[in-house]
Amino acid sequence: MTKPLKVLFLTRYPYEGASSRYRVFQYIPHLERLGVSCKVQSFMDRRMYALSFTPGRTPAKLAATLKATLSRIWLLRGFRKYDIIYMQRELLPFGPPILERLMKAFGACLMFDYDDALFIKKPSRYSRIATWMRSPQKALKLFKLCDCVVAGNDWLRDRALEEGGTAVTVEVAEDTDRIQIRPPHSNSDDIVIGWLGSKSTVKYLRLIEPVLRRISQRYPHVRFEIVGGGEFDFPGLAVTHTEWSLDGELDALRRFSIGLMPLPLEEWSRGKSGGKARTYMAAGVPAVCAAIGYNLELIDNNETGFLCTTDTEWEEAISKLIEDPDLRQRVAVDARHVVEERFSPSKQAAALREVFDKVLASKENAR
């Protein structure tokens, strides 16, 4: 019989934050069924999360950060009653890992989960304070300190191993019960080229702006929609902007004919774990993505999506999909099948439960 466990999950964001939702929240009901009693605390509450995307308002952000810090420290007074302390990204978003070292010294089993290249510093678009607080070296220290690092892809796992940590890969799941496949693609479709994300990542659409302008001129009937990117401006290009919400995301995916995922072709992008592409795939929206990092493992080029490096490749892939509804439908069905077979939340939760058991057994044997 599987031993019951108590795990404290410490996330960076509330449910609305994609990385926390995908890396922790979606697994909770499945883990509970596998004998894991789960307690989740988000560093940011919903108000602080919304505030984090607002330029300026430094005093309010500082106050929210102080409140969140005190709340997290207060919770950790009872860390000993948990079998595992599971940190999604970090315990605190600033400072050295002092609390982590203290808990480890008193016997805590610490696990560190990450799905982004946190060891590469990227400036915040909204706050100089957030940029200042980010410490790439902290992630490297946590790799060594924690009992296990759970990475979103093999490239991130290997980086943790190189730093002397113990690390495994648990790929991100996609809930195909929540995300239904869109209606079949056909000749009568209104063609919508869509992008789904957040205000912090919409800037990467600039990388393919010349392509989108040529597509607009070549296919004037095609519409563009940005979901979750705010009022991102493409002067002279007609774009519909839609605020992100959980239900609104599902509605948008049903409208999309093609989904875009541009990324800069740089080292940081190798740490991305394909969330946007996988969501398109689950929804039956053919994904056109940057050919870098985990995307190369996720997508079978020209079969379950399209991988692009040059502007010419981006334009050719988008054009083929616009012109050929049968191609869109074939890619949609094949991509959906891959997601159902490979990325179910119950399957990934079971993998996570197996990691928990192995880490605890290893810790017990080391005593």
Image (cartoon, helix red, strand yellow):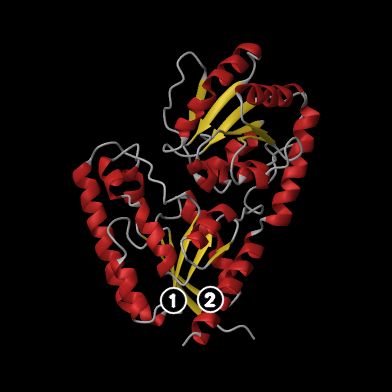
- SS at circle 2: helix
Q: Secondary structure at mark 1?
A: loop
> In the picture provided, is 326 more to the left or to the right than 215?
right
Check whether the beta carbons of the residues at disc 1 and disc 2 lie within 8 A of each other.
Answer: yes
What's the residue type where badge 1 is placed?
Answer: Cys
In the image: residue 216, left or right of residue 118: right
Please indicate, yes or no, whether residue 136 appears anywhere in the rendered image.
yes
The residue lying at 46 percent from left, 49 percent from top is: 117
Instruction: Give how far apart the Cα atoms at labels 1 and 2 are.
Output: 8 Å
Residue 323 drawn at (x, y percent): 75, 21
**Residue annotated with mark 2:** 359
On the rendered image, what quadrant is the N terminus found in? bottom right
**Who is closer to the viewer here, 137 or 132?**
137
Identify the mark nearer the N-term, 1 or 2: 1
Establish if 279 lies above or below 83: above
Q: Amino acid at mark 2?
A: Val
Q: Which residue is mark 1?
A: 109
Q: Position of residue 146 (x, y in %)?
A: 43, 69
Q: Position of residue 112 (x, y in %)?
A: 45, 64
Q: From what the image shows, is residue 103 above or below residue 180?
A: below
Q: Tell me the tag on residue 128.
A: none
Snapshot quadrant of residue 66: bottom left
User: Which residue is found at the position 73% from the left and 50% from the top?
Assistant: 338
Residue in front for this viewpoint, 154 or 175: 154
How many numbered badges does the structure rendering display?
2
Figure check: 345 above or below 131: below
> How many residues crowd mark 2 within 10 Å: few (<14), some (14–19), many (20+)?
some
Vertical comparison of 329 with 86: above or below = above
